[in-house]
Amino acid sequence: MTGSSTLEFSREGLTVSFVPDNASVAVVFKGKSDSRNPAGFFEEFTPKLLERSAGKKIYLDFRTLEYMNSATVSPVLSLVRTLDTHAIETVLLFDVRSDWQRINFRCMKVITKALAHVKVTE
């Protein structure tokens, strides 16, 4: 996915980039999310994501994320629920070769089964 209007947010070693194209927005997570309270960071970029995703599919791409602590799981799920509430088709991408990603995202697959517009894939 390519786009000329990439938007990026960074805090405490975690970088989140929005890479839009005509039909979708890739939200790429890089670095490490080791904050004790990452919810504020997610609340900071979620409104911008909603603005940029009107009528588009969203790919939440965690494949290049090096680490995510347990405190980050709740804000990720909150983001996913928000996207689902807005009827935005959302795909969570993870790296099956990474032990911590495989464990976390298998749990997310189970949790997101109740959401109509969300899919978790590798």
Image (tube, rainbow, N blue to C red):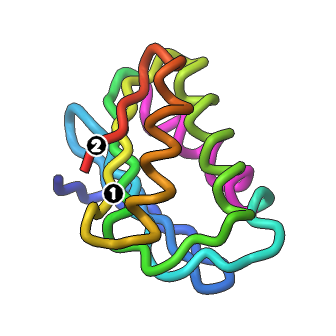
List x then y, in percent, for residue 54. Answer: 43, 26
From the image, tell me which residue sits under label 1.
94
Q: How far across and how far down the image is residue 114, in percent? A: 53, 18
Q: Earlier in the sequence, mark 1 or mark 2?
A: 1
Q: From the viewer's perspective, is 14 left or right of 55?
A: right
Amino acid type of the residue tagged 1 in the rendering: Phe
Along the horizontal axis of the image, is 48 left or right of 5?
Answer: right
Measured in 3D between alpha carbons, the distance from the residue under mark 1 to the one under mark 2, in whole angstroms, is: 7 Å
- Name the residue beneath numbered marker 2: 121
Q: Mark 1: which secondary structure?
A: loop
Quarter of the image for residue 41 reads: bottom right
Query: How many residues crowd mark 1 within 10 Å: few (<14), some (14–19), many (20+)?
Result: many
Q: Is 2 placed left or right of 117 in the picture? A: left
Mark 1 touching mark 2, by CB under 8 A? yes
Residue closer to the observer: 25 or 61: 61
Magenta residues (range): 41-54
